[in-house]
Image (cartoon, rainbow, N blue to C red):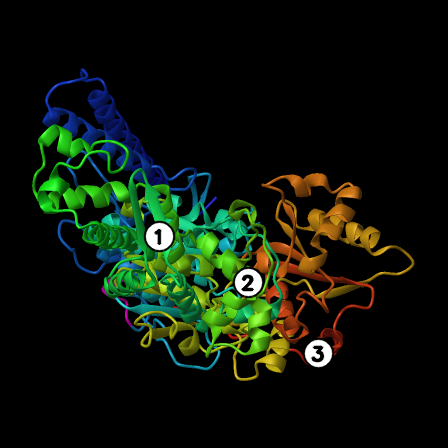
Amino acid sequence: MSSNPDLAAEQKYLARANERLQAMRRSAREMMEAALGTPRGGTHQARAERDVIVRRSLARLEQLEIGDQALTFGGIDYDRPLGPVSTYHIGRLAVSDEDMEPLVVDWRAPVAEPFYRATGKDPMGLTRRRHFALEHKELIDIEDELFDVEGYPEDSEGAGEIRLSGPGSLFAAVTRARTGRMADIVSTIQAQQDQIIRAPLPGILVVQGGPGTGKTAVALHRAAYLLYTYRMRLERQGVLVIAPSRIFARYIGEVLPSLGETGVQIMTIRGLAGFDDAALPESSEEALLKGDLRMASFIAKAVRDRQRPLKHPAEIALGAFVGAGSPADTAEVVKAAKRRGGTHNRRRRLVESLLAARIVEKYIAKKEIRANELASARGLFGEESASQKDAGVSDEAAVKAELARRLTKANDFQRLVQRIWPSLSPEELVGDLYSHMPLIRLAGRNLFKEEEMRLLFRPMSADAKARAWSKSDVVLLNEAKLHLGSYQKRLEDDDERGFGHIIVDEAQDLSPMEARMIGRYSLSSSITLVGDVAQATSPFGRRSWSEIVSAMPKGSSFELVELKVNYRTPQEVMDVAGALLKIFAPELRTAISIRHSGQPVTISHVVNEELMQHLSRVVRNEVSSVEPGTVAVIVPGEEKSVYLDGLTQSGLDALARPDARLAVLSIDEAKGLEFDSVVISGADHLLSSSSLNLQALFVAMTRTTNRLVFVHNRDVPGVIVDLLSQQKSGTGKEKPNIYYSANRG
């Protein structure tokens, strides 16, 4: 039990705040039920008002639902009152008493900023910062940092020194067992993280952070902060978070609701592209080519190539009417349509109307039909025109327009238009392109070499719905959709929704075409990119942020900030991972780890038994050692199914459960995730590209918060063996100097 004299008073205060939160929920629910209980019918205004009340009540209930998280986690005391009080309790959302006086202030409010930013050198007007230790919403301890004590140590700029806010709460959160779902860090946000979270909305912000620096959590808290600060704008425009995989999207899915925000969309690149079922594997060479910005010009040219006049005349017969589409007429029509704005499919209507008008004009001129004969014409199309019969049309121009309108419905005419200006879906365009070398050469001339064009060739099924697509393909399908517009006359869908702010995690792996697509969905180029160039494992390799951002529209300028403290990965792991980093990226520095786990990195060698039997034994030991935490087995992606079968046959069938404490993952799936223990097998070929294997190994090693084991039958890279030997001989890094930013009282 805590010895803090304020414990009982704080417990009472928190109980009152929680009671008020429940009362606020009841009030919102009663308002909704009252609106739903009103009689049906009434005036249009009454129905609209009822709908507004229901929507607002539902939104309020969602906002007030924080699950099993504690409402408040700390407080601050100012040296002078800011209004009626000088003490504020900081929490996940704002709660007021019956008189509308604040009991808890939202962590995003300006008054709460010193809770995260105050230091000994700049206390920001605080005399005390207080962190609560809670178990199941029950207050069990209090950690105070005092800013007005004599001899308070000022911040210095000493090399390797780390200043921590609420170190006790921070270490408790970092060492807590993982659950398979990401937890928010709202109670332990550090000063540098808070500066990034509260950065202004406009422009492109790039957050570079090594393993364990909390960059993903910072990005998610930034989404919540921006929605709070720019509510009127972003609730209408929306905030999008792009996750590197579906596994990662599920992993982070509970963070924003725990912060009182449910309006943020989370999706993958494939989901944003609109073709989320892509599963076709592709080689590194294919991915490099299809991710190249030249593909944008290639797709645009492929669309233009499908807008072509006839080479030979074509007859159109309908009843007594026999017209003809000539190469000259179709050339003029195609030329006129190309001059107009709009998407390809939207302009097809223009092509139809222009061509039909030309055919009717030439037919009438050829037959020398006079105006009065035209007005009384019967049976030209096999039946009398409805407009003539019902309205007695006598105006020559109106009759011509009617004849042209009816001509556009003729099957022969539609087949003709389809030849010169086909209605196309993205799947049809790209599928046809891949399937025919002449089309590839026509669109790729002056863009690609012959060997590159051959790399794009892929015979495909004639059935567009049966075609399989790769991850790179779906971005090209989205690019095609940009030019084609909606399909089958759903023209209102041409203008796809954009977002007021977009956050991209693991952005170091974006292909130029992916970056281009993301930029298109940003309404005002307001984007946050989060990643670590050292962890780049895509075929594009390690690039600068300037190269990555340059592919985005208006993406030539950006602000770069760097997170330099590793809160997650223990020093024992970073001694080896950091030395590995110096081999493949000597210009980069590892973030400083703030803790040791006491668990050395180990290599478990297979002796006189099968690899899967040995691996299963190691995994069982790790599951037991980190109980109730999580374990990841990271393996080569191409062999994942073999490992899954082998471990399942060994009785580790918990792998089949979505909420399992044990997961078998490829390096792409493991990115961004964290586990209490990581077991790596197949360490020398985690990726098919050997040139990227050290980067992949760096990513795999730094997923752990506690234990790291290599299981192998001669597949651990020699560099790891050498580094571990150095560590055992005492040549590893020394423990960094940890310097607290405030007196702990």
- The amino acid on which the numbered mark 2 sits, given as a three-letter code, is His
Residue 401 in view of the camera: yes
Residue under circle 2?
Answer: 436
Sequence-earlier tag: 2 or 3: 2
User: Is 126 within the magenta?
Assistant: yes
Residue at mark 2 to residue at mark 3: CA–CA distance: 62 Å
The residue at 82%/54% (across/down) is: 614
Residue 290 in view of the camera: no
Position of the C terminus, as image quadrant, is bottom left
Neighbours of disc 3 within 10 Å: few (<14), some (14-19), many (20+): few
Give left or right: position of 287 versus 232: right
User: x, y percentage for residue 330?
Assistant: 31, 60
Sequence-earlier tag: 3 or 1: 1
Sequence-earlier tag: 1 or 2: 1
Residue under circle 3?
Answer: 730
Task: Determine the residue located farthest toward the front in the rendered image.
Answer: 368
> Which residues, given as a range, are shown in magenta?
122-128
User: Is 689 within the magenta?
Assistant: no
The residue at 40%/55% (across/down) is: 419
Neighbours of disc 2 within 10 Å: few (<14), some (14-19), many (20+): some
